[in-house]
Amino acid sequence: MSGKAWREAEVLERERRWGPAGVAWQAIADRAWAQGDIVRTRDAACRAGDAWRREDRPALAARALKLAWDAGRRGPMDAALLAAVLLDAGQPDVALDLVHDVEGADEGARAVLLDVRLGLEVALGQVDAARADLDALDALAIPGATIARVFRQAQVDRLDGLLERSDDGFAAAARALAGMEGAAGPRAAALAERGELALLRAALGHGNAGSAVPHLEAALVDWRAAGREGPALRAEAWLLRARRLAGDAVLAEPILGWIAGAVQRGLPMLAADLQVSYAIATGDPAGLVDVLAALEHAPLARGRVRVITAELGGEADLDAALSELEPDAPWFARGLLAVSRRDHDDAGIADARARIDAFFPPPDLDA
C-alpha cells in the first residue's frame, strides 16, 4: 500500500480540510481491509471517522468507526469518539451508554471519557451524575483534565443558577486555551457558552443581549479556524439571535439554508438549534412545533424550546416544559414565569421573580 497516500491524508488532516481528509482516510482503510491489513485498516478508519465527525457527517463517521471496530479497534478513546458522533446524530442517551465504563482506561483516556460523559450528562440534565464525574475528573492530575474540569463545572454551575461563577469558569477556560496549539475548537466552545449565558441573563432581566455579541463573534472566528462548519453556522445563527434581541434589524433568511444543510447531513440537533435561532431572529414561533420531535432524546432542549415558543406568542405545553426543565434552575424559573403569566397567577409571577432574583445576588460591599 502506498505510503504516499498516507502522507497526503496526514497533510489534509493537519490543514483541517476535514472533508477531503475523510475521503482520503476512508479510501486507505477500505483498501487495507480488502488486502487483509488489519492494523492499517484500524488506524485509517479511526482517522476517517474523526475527520468525518469534524466535517459534520455523522453517518459517514459512524460507517468509518464501524470498520475500525470490525478491525478490532475497541478502546476507550474509540468509544468516546463514537459517542460524540451519536450526540451529533441526536442520540445523547445511546451515546451515554457507550462511555458508561471508564475503568481500565489509562489516565489520559479516562479524562477524555469523563469529559465526554459529563457533556452528555449536562445535555440530559443528569446533574447528580455530573457532580460525581466532576469529582472523578478533578482527581486526575493532568493538564487537560484541569481545563476540562473548569469548563464542565461552569456548565453545571449554569444549571444550578450560579450564573456569575459559571461565566467566570467559561472565561477561565477560554483564557487557558488561548494560543494553545489545536485548541481553537475547545476555546470556541467556551466563548460560545459565554455568549449564550449572556443571552440567558438578559432574558431573565439582568444585562442586555448586546453583551453576548463579542463572545459569539470570537467563537465564530475560532470555529472557523478549527475548520468546524456546523458549530460555526450555529455561532453565526446565535449572533443573529443576539442582535435581534438587542434591537437590531437582521436578515434571518440565510438560516433557512443552513437548516436544510443540517437536515441533509443528518444533524437533527444542529437543525433544531438553527430553527430556534430563526424563530427568535424573525419573532415567529411557527416553525418550532416540528423542532420538538427532533429533540425527543434531549429533554432540557425540549423544555427550553417550549418556553421560547410561549415567549414568542405561540402555543406551548408549558406544564411539560416545567417537568423537563426541573434540573435547570434558571430555565425552570423562566418557564414558571411563562406559566404564571399565561394563568394570570400573581403569586406564581412573584415566586418566579424571586427565584430569578436569587440568581443575581447583590455584590458584597464588605468583601
Image: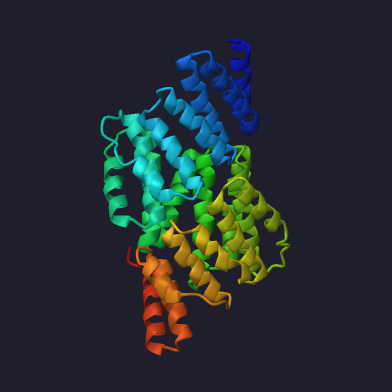
Q: Give the answer, above or below, for where 174 lies relative to 289.
A: above
Locate the N terminus and report the quarter of the image it occupies: top right
Q: Work out whether residue 123 or residue 317 is closer to the camera in this orientation and state it.
A: 317
Q: Which quarter of the rendered picture does the C terminus lie within?
A: bottom left
Q: Nearer the viewer, residue 364 or 246?
A: 246
Task: Report the colour scheme.
Answer: rainbow
Position of residue 195 relative to residue 54, above or below, is below
In the image, 23 versus 322, the foreground residue is 23
Location of residue 78 in the rendering, given as x and y in whole percent from the top left corner:
41, 31
Q: Vertically, is 49 above or below 242?
A: above
Identify the residue shown where x is 51% and y is 18%.
33
Where residue 229 appears, as percent x and y from the top left, is 63, 43
Q: Total of numbered circles in the picture?
A: 0
- The reply, left or right, for residue 231 in relation to residue 365 is right
| Residue 127 in sight in this render | yes
Q: Is residue 198 above or below residue 86?
A: below
Residue 150 in sight from this viewpoint: no
- Tell me if 339 is positioned left or right of 222 in this view: left
The quarter of the picture where residue 282 lies is: bottom right
Residue at 46% across, 75% down: 317
Residue lying at the far front of the rendered structure: 34
The x and y percentages for residue 227 are: 62, 37
Q: Which residue is drawn at 60% across and 38% down?
A: 55
Residue 125 coordinates in the image, percent (x, y): 37, 58
